[in-house]
């Protein structure tokens, strides 16, 4: 007998990140913290090895009235002041498109809702070949296929592969649904230039002459860009989209406010045509009501309070950790260059990813663990989480990794 829908994959989930994180924890208990290099954790940690929870954020949260924390949000699509705050904070005045904001449980909620509501079973989602693994899982759970393009050509975005993958997909279906995780790509740390974005939009405008286009821009790490608010200037390029394109920006409060467990984010629906925005909004509203019903009211109230009353404190506090992240990544890359340890082009972000084929990656990953170095396997590489790795643990790591790589051939 089958108690779930026939077309769903029933193999047990194996989350490679959490499995390796657990192995690293066990190793620390057995051999001690000093003996272990734990480059697995995809959250921001300080130099003492503690999870960063910004005081400006959590002082605000804890100062809220208990009833504010306890009650339902004003609407299942989010509180109006939160929706306005998200639009202002994310877009920073860089867009004149029509737009609507739907509150979601983290950026994940925005991505998952887009995959579920914009593609039918059997249709195809387009993602890069190196990407956050949950994109594929979301597609799989909806019976959606995945087409992936090569992410890089030398040290730049592989525009040719991206375009060809879109063209091939257009032969099979009436729409394109594309995920681009930018800036601060997870897991490579690449950020597209404004010129690359302009070429992508110009190409999608051509595609939209015959096919509906939904572009999902996952901006989870945008507030940890080394460029500050300049990182948001590329939203201006979206003003060039045609009437047949909808852009959905997936915002993550989890990353921006170091509030990972509060599960709050938003989908910003943008288009030249108000009717297109409304069509997506209506379906997303129903999906929100039917799936999670309500979003964490305290998290939304906290976000509004921080931006209204504690912005200077939050900015100074966050920038301290952006600076630290930059120092860690620069140290790792400098030593990797000296050791001739290859990595994908990194601009900014939580992760640096070593470049290698998957057969080498598997052997290398095991060899690293034998030496008490814990990392995460991704497609065609090894992810090093500089976000959680202290400068002390970062120093000398690239050289050690290169020596281990040389040993395994």
Image: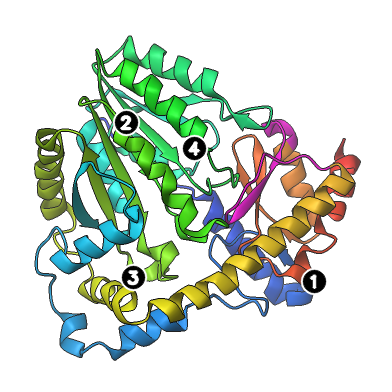
Q: Which residue is mark 4?
A: 194
The magenta span reads 341-360
Q: How many marks?
A: 4
Number of residues whose C-alpha sits closer than 10 Å to that of mark 3, classed few (under 14), some (14–19) or many (20 or more): some
Cα–Cα gap, marks 4 and 2 = 13 Å
Vertical placement of residue 180 versus 218, above or below? above
For image coordinates 14% across by 65% down, the residue present is 80
Specify the label residue 35 is tagged with: 1
In the image, which disc is placed on residue 262?
A: 3
Residue depth check, mark 3 versus mark 2: number of the one nearer the observer:
2
Residue 221 drawn in magenta: no
> Disc 3 or 2, which lies upstream in sequence?
2
Q: Say which residue appears at 55% left-offset and 60% top-offset.
A: 42
Q: Earlier in the sequence, mark 1 or mark 4?
A: 1
Residue at the disc numbered 2: 240
Specify the quadrant of the image occupied by residue 137.
top left
Q: Nearer the viewer, mark 1 or mark 3?
A: 3
Is residue 352 within the magenta segment?
Answer: yes
Query: Which is more N-terminal, label 2 or label 4?
Result: 4
Depth order, front residue of 25/106: 106
**Mark closer to the observer (1, 4):** 4
């Amino acid at each position: 007998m089958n108690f779930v829908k026939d077309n769903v994959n029933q193999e047990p989930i194996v989350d490679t990140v959490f499995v390796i994180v657990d192995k690293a924890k066990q190793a620390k208990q057995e051999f001690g913290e000093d003996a272990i290099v734990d480059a697995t954790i995809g959250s921001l940690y300080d130099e003492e090895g503690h999870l960063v929870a910004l005081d400006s954020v959590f002082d605000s949260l804890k100062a809220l009235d208990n009833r504010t924390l306890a009650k339902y949000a004003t609407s299942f699509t989010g509180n109006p002041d939160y929706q306005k705050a998200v639009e202002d904070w994310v877009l920073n005045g860089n867009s004149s498109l029509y737009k609507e904001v739907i509150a979601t449980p983290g950026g994940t909620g925005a991505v998952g809702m887009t995959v579920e509501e914009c593609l039918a079973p059997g249709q195809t989602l387009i993602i890069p070949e190196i990407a956050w693994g949950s994109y594929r899982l979301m597609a799989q759970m909806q019976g959606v296929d995945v087409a992936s393009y090569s992410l890089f050509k030398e040290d730049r975005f592989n525009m040719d592969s991206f375009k060809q993958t879109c063209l091939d997909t257009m032969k099979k279906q009436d729409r394109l649904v594309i995920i681009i995780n930018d800036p601060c790509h997870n897991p490579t740390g690449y950020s597209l230039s404004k010129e690359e974005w302009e070429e992508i939009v110009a190409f999608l405008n051509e595609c939209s002459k015959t096919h509906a286009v939904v572009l999902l821009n996952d901006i989870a790490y945008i507030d940890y860009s080394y460029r500050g608010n300049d990182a948001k200037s590329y939203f201006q390029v979206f003003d060039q989209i045609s009437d047949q394109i909808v852009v959905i920006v997936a915002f993550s409060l989890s990353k921006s406010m170091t509030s990972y467990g509060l599960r709050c984010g938003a989908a910003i629906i943008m288009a030249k045509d108000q009717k297109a925005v409304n069509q997506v909004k209506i379906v997303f509203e129903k999906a929100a009501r039917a799936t999670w019903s309500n979003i964490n009211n305290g998290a939304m109230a906290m976000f509004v309070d921080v931006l209204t009353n504690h912005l200077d404190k939050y900015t100074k506090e966050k920038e301290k950790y952006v600076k630290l992240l930059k120092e860690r990544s620069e140290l790792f890359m400098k030593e990797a260059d000296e050791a001739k340890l290859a990595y994908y082009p990194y601009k900014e972000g939580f992760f640096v990813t070593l470049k290698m084929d998957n057969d080498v990656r598997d052997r290398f990953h095991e060899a690293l663990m034998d030496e008490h170095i814990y990392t995460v396997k991704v497609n065609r590489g090894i992810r090093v989480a500089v976000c959680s790795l202290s400068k002390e643990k970062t120093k000398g790591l690239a050289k050690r990794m290169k020596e281990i790589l040389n040993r395994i051939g």
